[in-house]
Image (cartoon, rainbow, N blue to C red):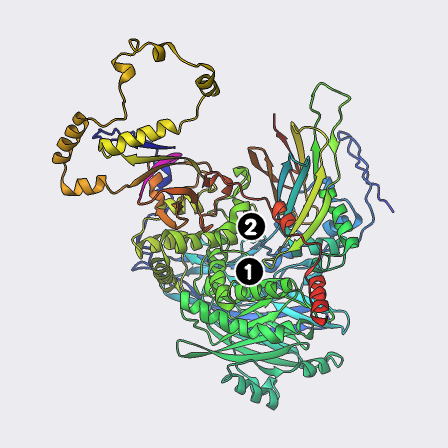
Amino acid sequence: MKQFFTVLFVGLTSSVMSQSKFAQLDTELPTPNEYRTAAGAPGHNYYQQKADYKMQIRIDDETQKLSGEETITYTNNSPDKLEYLWLQLDQNIYDVNSDTKLIEVEKMEDFKNIGDVKKKLFYYDGGFKVESITSASGQKMSYAINKTMMRINLDKPLLPKTSISFKIKWWYNINDRMAVGGRSGYEFFEKDKNYLYTVAQFFPRMCVYNDVEGWQNKQFLGRGEFTLPFGDYEVSISVPSDHIVGATGELQNGSAVLSAEQRKRFEQAKAATQPVLIVTQSEAEAKENKREKSYKTWTFKATNVRDFAFASSRKFIWDAQSVKVNGKNILAMSYYPKEGNPLWERYSTKLVAHTIKTYSKYTVDYPYPVAISVHSKWIGMEYPMICFNGGRPEEDGTYTEREKYGMWGVIIHEVGHNFFPMIINSDERQWTWMDEGLNTFVQYLTEQEWERDYPSSRGPAYLIADYMRGDKKFISPIMTNSESIFQFGNNAYGKPATALNILRETIMGRELFDYAFKTYCERWKFKHPTPADFFRTMEDASAVDLDWFWRGWFYGNEHVDISLENVKWFQLNTMDPTIEKAIDESEERSKDKFIGDGRNKSSIKQTINEADPAIDDFYAKRNIYKVDALDVKEYEEFQKKLSDEEKKLLSANKQFYELSFSNLGGLVMPLIIEVTYIDNSTEVIRIPAEIWRQYEDKVSKVLILNKEAISFRLDPFLETADTDLDNNSWPKRVQPTRYELFKQKQTGENPMQRQKRLEELQGQ
Amino acid sequence: MSIICKFELSVIELSKIFIILSFCFFSTTAEAHSYFFAFAEVEYNEVNGKIEATITATAHDLERYLQKKNILQKNLSDCTNDSVSLSILEKVINQHFAITINPNDENSIMDGNELFMLHLEGIEIQMTGTIQIYLSGTVKRALNSVDLFFDLLMDEYPEQQNKATFIYREYKETLVFLPTKKSETIELK
């Protein structure tokens, strides 16, 4: 029912209410300083340490044992004197006394079958066996191992702008990844008795020392990954001579480890825009039964990387192609056993090329000479220039569409990690979201450029709604340390990716967002950014106050549920008696009538006042809807007082709608309102989130429209992650449940049965 | 074969646990894995007197779970029209997702709890990597108090967290389930 109103001048009183959701993040963010500016950029005295490695590694294919010797040259670029050095011993997570096992919460119901008991009591002799640590001159150095961390004690402090070199000798038993799990390890192929090694976290690695944490020596418990300084690597890897090795960096001794034919194909690949096979499937298969006993040493060099990983197997098929990023040729490569085909030969290297090209567009130009995808059943794990990815077809070579998309997604994601955190080198041990979340966001952009309407599993706002609703006690804010997160994937991958998508599509717009995001990446490439550096840069480069957004989406755990509670309709009173009285009369006539009134009209033949004209007085005789001379005069006087502009406004037939909203979920978001007009045309009105800045629970907004509206809908493009769409419409429109949608589309036949029917029809 | 465990502690009551024989073995220790969730949407349809539910889970988590437990060795994508596999899946789901309608009169000892089997209506595999499992079950009494049990995948993945949104008339609430909190009660009075 529409209502009419007269324009009045009234004084408004404003009540002071809480503005906590829009409070600036002053207390949450660290104070800017000479190392990190208030703008989110590296400060004028920003520094970072450097760790260079020279390593000799050997894999014993008979015992699956890795032994190594490394010389680390550590350069102290900080202004501080360092009394000791901390290194990471990540393999110690497999030590029998590992905290990771001890901190598992258990109940007796976890021991339901003998497999559960066996699993709990399983012992694998993992962990680093450190044999010696010596100085460059060969002197023994003292050290202390604290679970996954090792402190090397220095005879005298390492002064600013000085370096120290020392040697470590160690070995460990490589984990059977299929039994023990883990980010790296080996897979044994029962049929041909061969091993495929994906090797990482295999050497004692320097911890980061910086202005934020001092030494980042938080123990490795399994989830929070790695925080590593940049450096240069030269690594020699001895493996059986029929193995093919892919690694971080560029191969230095191709002539010693590759055949002439392989070298020829390798050179061809450097100029090819399609994958070129360097080792074919038949060549790889031919080696499976021979199993060479002799060893060869492959040497790789990598500059300005934060880590090193490699893969080795005689089962490897190897292909490569060139991809150009901003005029520079990069070699995209894949290593996979025959078990990965036909998926891997068809897609892997092309996905690598597409990923580094697309990420370079949104972040920074890919700086390394190679980018490698290695097939490794089940997992997805990232290292500089190389990553290990799942996506294995069935034994008969068939695969489901889901497997294909799963493989595509994991390759894009893991190759994408080259940018986050391998180049934009955040603290993974502390903040999973800084690499996983940002990477998942760009993964979404990259997937959408790979195939139109790619079914991305994370990114679009509506996909996070299920996760965000429910008891807040069990939903962690994004700004939570990796080890304490509930629903790791949705929290650290999905929610930040969604948040960035919302910033890009809804809050900031693509131009402002893309510029600011790229600014962050450029500022922090080959450096160590923190969350504050990201938050500040995004504001600094866009002039959009995002503190409320970071507070709600990153520091909070509330969800989005904005309800369109009520709509009231008004029109301006024109003051023209011929119009207004006619409308009043029409409204009076259209009112619902009491049943007795209608029956009385026929049952009562004549009332007393109808029979006796003397009964009716002035009030009974007057017609309140009739326009009289006084009405006309008053209207003329009113018109004289109005300017031409005011007269035009009064006659414009504007429609006024007062919409009332409730913030049920707590997380404030813009109001995106789709209006459907009486002629079925639509319009979308966007109101910034700041409408909630003083009144966080309930707000109202008057929309002044040129046409009558018949309905209003909140969030019509599913861009705010609203968890309850049932309260988004006026008139109310309840969304079907998933079950109802399933029932509606059930036809009783599967797609193949339908195809069969179609073929029968076409055959007739 | 069963194993009897005996605890020789005087202050703790002796318990004997019977462990079934199952040699499936896989450790997820230290493996970065970004999934481990299941969401259920449960609605009571007053028109047909049925509970209608959809469970959304990560397809490969469920697939690996079923394979490791030696329950079902097939790819779930191949099960959508396989009645034998669907029947097995229905049984598994009913073991790990249960709805109990509590007595209407809390003083009545005759009016026991109503736990009913959910019928698996079908499954759908999404290209985003999730499986949707559609279920229904007829309710014989008015809903005043409902117990929801939802520990799907929790016995294999310690980090699993499940959520169920229960819809009844104007009531809509999302409940969280964890390995330490596998059931919840909803009061609809």
- Spatial distance from mark 2 to mark 1, Cα to Cα? 21 Å
- Residue A26 in view, yes or no: no
Q: Is residue A697 magenta?
A: yes
Which chain is disc 1 placed on? A
Q: Magenta stretch: dominant SS?
A: strand
Camera-nearest residue between B139 and A254: B139
The reply to whether the magenta stretch includes residue A126 is: no
Label 1 element class: loop
Residue A713 percent across, percent down from the top left: 43, 44
Which residue is located at x 61 percent, y 77 percent? A245
Q: Which residue lies furthest to the right in this view?
A: B1
Image quadrant where residue A62 sits? bottom right
Q: In this view, does A355 lie above or below A739?
A: below
Give, as a single range, the part of the protein colored magenta.
A696-705
Tell me the chain of label 2. Answer: A
Q: Residue at x 66, y 81 (%)?
A: A241
Q: Nearer the viewer, mark 2 or mark 1?
A: 1
Are labels 2 and 1 assigned to the same chain?
yes
Q: Badge 2 is on which residue?
A: A488
Q: Give the quarter of the image for residue A533.
A: bottom left
Q: What residue type is labelled 2?
A: Phe
Q: Name the residue under label 1.
A: A455
Q: Which of marks 2 and 1 is nearer the N terminus?
A: 1
